[in-house]
Amino acid sequence: MQQNTTTYGDAAASPITAPHSGARNINSRDTAISPGDIAVGVVIGRASEYFDFFVYAIASVLVFPAVFFPFADRLEGTLYSFAIFALAYIARPIGTLIFMAIQRHFSREIKLTIALFMLGTATVAISALPTYSRWGEWAIISLAVLRLGQGFALGGTWDGLPSLLALNAPEHKRGWYAMLGQLGAPVGFIIAAGVFSYLMAELSQDDFLVWGWRFPFYVAFAINVVALFARLRLISTPDYTHLLDEHQLDAVPVREVAGKQGSTIVLGALAALASYALFHLVTVFPLSWLQLYDTRSMSDFLVVQIWGGGLAIVGVLASGLIADKFGRRNTLGTLAALIALFSGFVPTLMDGGATGQNTFILVGFLLLGMSYGQASGAVTSNFLPEYRYTGAALTSDLAWLVGAAFAPLVALGLAANYGLGYVSLYLLSGALASLAALSLNRALEIRN
């Protein structure tokens, strides 16, 4: 496959061969697409999605146990909240399946518009939900339905920009370009944590639980609208369509991809398991553990996590440089081994007072950034060109489902009932699964 970054200017003159190309000319502009344009679209899109993601995640710890599960004790209420939290990851692959069909029959723009408006609507509707004291069980049912709606909509937000960016990267900078899409996670977390930290510091607990927590959900809807137009401005151009056609980055039936390269989907998801398991163990789980078993100010602790998010950004950036020098798979494997080592310190650090907890957060976020920075491209590059668009989306869905969906629920349940040592074992299992998948993938490549 040729990698030629100097042909962007000629793309506009090339014929558009994809079906329904007329729909792609909405917001069309005459200028050619540069790698920088694609990178901006990737970061904006992912940051907006992760802001939605973390607004819900933080609220599932600090708000929902008291608002929707007041009949349960604090631990049970948080576990119930985490069970609903996981529903989005179950619905996400179903959303991918349905929205890929919408894209094949209509267009990528229509799919993305429907998905982001559905995501925004579900998010803002959560902010308007009556509490359990007013609606009873219907409040919980409504929260679960809207959470399913968020996950379903997320399945349709895949626009192919990360794959396009990686494919058009120079050979010696693929690690750097692959990490750009991953920057959205720490950026989204920093903004979400900052909003919640400010509200908790400035409002009384009663005001925060009555109306203050709803504000970030409205902000998430507004950010989604802005991100939608920013992404449509890019993907609706003839240049973008030409690049997608050139690399065969279009939706194909999920059954076909699973039948032809199902093993690549599974290996890709497992190879990133250490990253995805650590993802919630440094963001959501510590909040829940300290909320239940410590007296630290949650607003102050969120500030520590914001600093951790900054280190994660540094880690993501560093991962691009390291991967280009030593290889993406070597980088991911080395980080999985370091995460396995880090897992052994979970009990000591989380039981080590503020100093130990802060160390856990800062070191954990740095490892997360370096690992997550290359989690999306180490194995998905094995997809045949015609399957890469759909295959990358399915790999991401499976990685979130297996590695992250139930991590807060499992980690808190194990820690509360059996001790923090079992959280170490849980994280260790994810790291070992990543190392095994990377080794198996290497062996298959050698055999082929």
Image: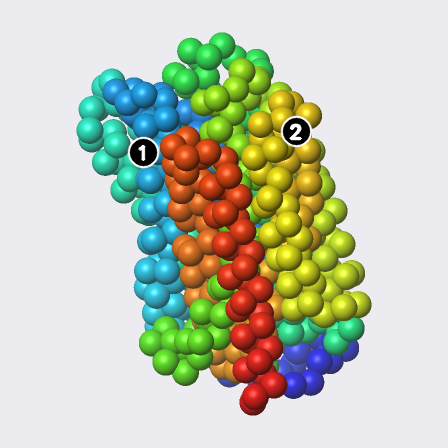
Would you call the spot at circle 2 few (<14 residues within 10 Å), some (14-19), or many (20 or more)? some
Describe residue 122's horizontal placement relative to residue 431 as left or right: left
Which mark, by number, is residue 199? Answer: none
Asked whether the residues under the numbered discs 1 and 2 touch, taking CB atoms below 8 Å apart as contact, a structural biologist would say: no
The residue lying at 64 percent from left, 42 percent from top is 364
Label 1 residue SS: helix
Type of the residue with mark 2 = Gly
Disc 2, SS: helix
Residue 80 is labelled as 1
Residue 118, placed above or below residue 133: below
For marks 1 and 2, give the one nearer the viewer: 2
Relative image position of residue 339 (x, y in whole percent): 62, 51
Question: Which residue in the structure is indicated by mark 2?
Answer: 356
Q: Nearer the viewer, residue 446 or 184?
A: 446
Of the numbered discs 1 and 2, the one sitting upstream in the chain is 1
Name which residue lies at 38% across and 68% down: 100
Amino acid identity at mark 1:
Tyr
On the rendered structure, is 50 left or right of 261? right
State the quadrant of the C terminus: bottom right
Horizontal and vertical percent for residue 26? 51, 63
Q: Report the side of 325 relative to 402 (left or right).
A: right
Residue at 50 percent of width and 54 percent of height: 429
Q: Nearer the viewer, residue 429 or 441?
A: 429
